Image (cartoon, rainbow, N blue to C red):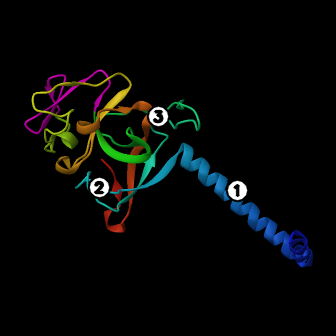
Amino acid sequence: MLRAIRDMVDRIPTRHKENIREWVESIVVAFILAMFIRTFFLQAFKIPSGSMRLTLLEGDRLLVNKLRYGPKVPFTKKRLPGLTKPKRGDVIVFSYPEDPKRDFIKRLIAMGGETVEIRYGDIYINDQLVEEPRIKNIYYYNRGPYGEIDQKIKVPSGYFYVLGDNSASSHDSRFWGFVSEHYITGRAEFLYWPLNRIRFIH
């Protein structure tokens, strides 16, 4: 079998061999470059559910900026320095704490060391009403073991509390708790598909 393959290769004209080699080299370089960009800069992400309606709809495709918070170093728990720190109101993509192989997307509500409470649909951080429009304009429901009525949740250091914009139908921190800083992939920056919804994400 191998001998037959060698004979076939030997019968290919030298000029064609050079073209094939250049073609293969181009593919390898493009693949390495794409993996480098995906690992350290940008990653495409598709919205799988309606948990972020109406900010993001099912099937929306967006770009996640990994450089903003600092990309994770592959095969380690280390993260390179980022441009900024995660901020309240950011829409972030992260590994689902109960199954790290799955990606989730939610809005960042509270950071490590803060106390969060859902009161009459509003968010209170350290007993102060959050006035940030991206959070203030959403009605949040008291649900789950981490989102009950009259319950103040203390977010551990190095973790975040996240909620979906579609609070009536979102599996978020109210149910499973907190997101480790290490699990954050990046910030959702730009919605590029469908064409009639192209925009920056806020």
Q: Residue at x 17, y 32 (%)?
A: 130
* Cα distance between the residues tagged 1 and 3: 28 Å
Q: Which residue is label 1 attached to?
A: 29
Q: Tag 3: residue type?
A: Leu
* Cα distance between the residues tagged 1 and 2: 34 Å
Please provide the residue range marked out in magenta: 110-130
Residue at the far left in the pictured view: 120
- For the N terminus, the quadrant is bottom right
Q: Residue at x 37, y 39 (%)?
A: 98
Sequence-first tag of 2 and 3? 2
Check residue 116 for magenta coloring. Answer: yes
Categorize mark 3 by other alpha carbons within 10 Å: few (<14), some (14-19), many (20+).
few
Q: Which residue is label 3 attached to?
A: 83
Q: Nearer the viewer, residue 137 or 105?
A: 105
Q: Which residue is label 2 attached to?
A: 56
In the rendered image, residue 183, in percent from the top left (x then y), is placed at 43, 36
Q: Secondary structure at mark 3?
A: loop
Q: Nearer the viewer, residue 148 or 157?
A: 148
In the rendered image, residue 192, in percent from the top left (x then y), is placed at 40, 60
Check residue 142 for magenta coloring. Answer: no
